[in-house]
Amino acid sequence: MRPLFEWAHRFLHLGLLRCASLLVPRQQRGEWRREWRGELWHVRQACAPVGSGSRQGEREVTAFCLGAFQDALCLRRAGRLPQPPFAAMEGTARQCVLILAAALAASYALALLLPGVRAERSQWPRKVNPNLVLIEQAAASDYARPTIAPEQFRAWKARKQKYFDGFAFYRVTRETVETESLTSGTDSRTAWVVGRASSNLFSLLGLPVRFAEAGAGAGDGLPEVILSESVWKRKFGADARVAGMVVRIGIRAARVAGVAPDGSLSLPGSVDAWLLEPDASKGVGGAGYVIAHLTPAGRAQMWAPCVRITANAPDDAEDDLLGVALEEWRSTPGTLYRFAMFLALLALPAITSVSLGESSLNPGKTSWSQRLHRWSFLGAKIALLLPIIYFVSLDMAFGWTTLDREHAAYIQLVSTFGLCLFGLRWVLKDQRQRCPVCVRRVAHPAHVGQASRTFLDWNGTEMMCMGGHTLLHVPSLPTSWFSSQRWLYLDTSWGFLFAGSSQHIP
Amino acid sequence: MAREPRLPETKLSHTAALILQALDAGFVYGFSIMEMTGLPSGTVYPAMRRLERDELILSRWERQSIADAEQRPARKYYKLTAAGKVTLEASRRRYPLLERLIPTGEVKTV
C-alpha cells in the first residue's frame, strides 16, 4: 500500500505543478516548471523521503506544490503591470526603421494635403517650347518696357516670314478686377496687372495651364482669363475651384480658364492675369510685347542669345529690332534638392567624423552576415531619410500659399541643406553607437575617470550593448594611443547576465 | 580603469531583506531559503524573481552533469550581486534583527 500511496502523491504533486505552470506566461513556463520540479525533488527528500510514508511530510510537499499556484498568480499580476509601449523594441534597428518610415509617411501625407505643394508637384515635369524669341525695338534701353506697336505686329503677321512661323502679342494694363471669394462668397475689387494677349500665347509658349479642362468655355462666349500662379495662391488660396469662375476685368466679364506657372520664361510685365483675346492686337497705340517662334532657318541665324533683326515697318521703312532668346530658367524642386544635398555632403566632414568607429580592443568577432546587416541598416536609414528631407522641405517651402516662388525656392534650398547636413550627421552618430553584432543602440552610459585625476590613464564613457555582446569605450580626451571609440567584444561567459535579452541577434 | 561602484541604496521589504540575508548566509537554493526563513513557496520564488529583475541577485542553473550524477533534476541557485550586497548592508542597518535571525556564514552548503 505504501508505494502506491507514495506514487499517488507523486503524480498528484507533478500534476499540481503542471497545472500551476499553465497559469505562467508561455515564454516563462518551461523555466518555471523546471525550477519547481528541481526544487520538488529536494522538498521531497527533506519532508517525505522514499519509504517514509509520512502523511505529514506529504502534506508539506503538497503545500509546496500549492505554493506554485501563488507563484504563478503573482507572476501573472506582475505581467499585467503597465509596460512602456514597445519596450522590447527599445533601441533596436527595427524601431529606428519604423520611426523613419512613419516620418516618411507623415511628410508625404502632408505634401499630398497641402494645396501649395500639390500645385507645385502637378507642374513637374514640364517642357516649354524651345526656340522662342522676344522681339523689341533695338533702341529700347529697358528690356521690360513694351516697344512694339499693334499695327507693326499685324503687318508682320500678315506677311510670309522666313525666320518665324508663329507670333503672339500681348500688352500690359493695370485694371480693376472684381472677384468673388470662394469661401465667403463676398465680392472684392482689386487692381491687377492684366496682360491682354493673343489667344495663341500659351500654345505658342507651350506652357502647361492647370485646370484647363475644368475651366474650358461653357459656350457663354466669355473671353478666357489665365491666372498667374502667385495670384492663384495669394488671392484664392490655391483652390482648384477657381477654374470656371467668372471675374470682371474692367467692364468686361471673363471666365477663369486655368492657372499658369510663375517665373516661366521671364516674360516681361509681371502679369497677374492673362486675358486671352483674338483681337488683342487690334487698335492703335498702346505698345506691347511680341513673342515669336523660330523656323529652322531662324534658328540658324540665332547664333547668340540676342541678335539684331531688320524688318519692314508698315510704311515700308526699315525697323531695327532685337531678338532676345527666351529660356526656361525656373528651377524645379528636384534640382534644388540635389544641389542642396550636394552642398550638405561637402559640408558634412566639417561637423562630424565620417568614420563608423568600428575599431575594436580585441579581435573582431562579427560574421559577414552581421556586417551585411549593419551596412544594410545604414543604407536603409539613408534611403528613408533622404525622401523625408525632400518632402519636409517641400512642405516648408510650398505649404505657405502666400509665399512667392522665389522665396519658396530659397526656403527649400536652406531647409534641404540644413536637414541633410544634420540628418546625415545623426545617421553617422547613431551608427557609431550601434552594437556591431546586433545593431542595437548601446545604453547605460557610465563615465569612467576624470581627466584631471587620471591624466595618463584612460577616461571616457563606457556604454553597454543590452544584448550582452559588446562594450563601447568613447574617450573624453582623444590621445595618440586612444583617439577614437573602440568596441570590446564580450565572450559568452557574460551571457547569463543578459538572460532577459538573450544573446539574440535580430 | 578601476571604478568604485556607486549604486543607489534600495529600500527592501522585510521579506526581501530576509531572502538576501539568507543568500548571504549561504542558502543559495529556493527551498533552502524557504526552510531557513519559514516563508512559503508562493512568496519566496516571486520575491526572488523581483530581486533578480532589480539586479540584486543573479541566478544560474546547475550543470546538468552534476544533477545526472546524483540522479535528480538540475536546480537553480542564486547569489548576491554587488548591488545586492550594498542593499543588504543598508537593510541590516534598517532591520537590526536580520543578522540575529540568520547569522552570516551559518551554512555554506545545503
Image (cartoon, coloured by chain):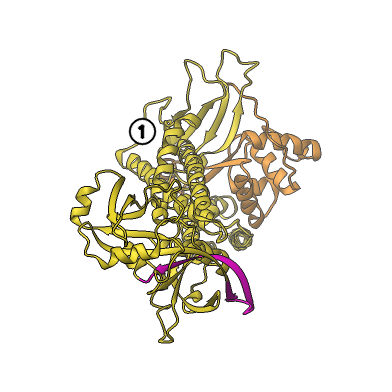
Chain colours: A yellow, B orange
**Place of residue A362 in the rendered image (x, y in percent of width and height, measured from the top left):** 40, 25
Query: Who is closer to the viewer here, A281 or A422?
Result: A281
- Residue A68: quarter of image: bottom right
Q: How many marks overall?
A: 1
Q: Nearer the viewer, residue A68 or B2?
A: B2
Name the residue at 51% across, 42% down: A418
- Chain holding disc 1: A
The answer to whether A148 is drawn above or below residue B19 in the figure is below
Query: Residue B31, position in %: x, y?
Result: 60, 49
Q: In percent of the image, x 22 and y 48: which residue is there?
A: A301
Residue drawn at (60%, 56%), measured in percent from left and top? Answer: A84
Asked if residue A198 lies in the magenta stretch, the reply is yes
Q: Residue furthest bottom?
A: A219
What percent of the width, then of the height, locates residue A189? 62, 72
Say which residue appears at 41% left-offset and 31% top-offset. Answer: A358
Q: Is residue A158 magenta?
A: no
Q: Which residues are magenta?
A: A177-199
According to the picture, the residue beneath numbered tag 1 turns out to be A365
Secondary structure of the residue carrying numbered label 1: loop
Report the predominant secondary structure element of the magenta stretch: strand
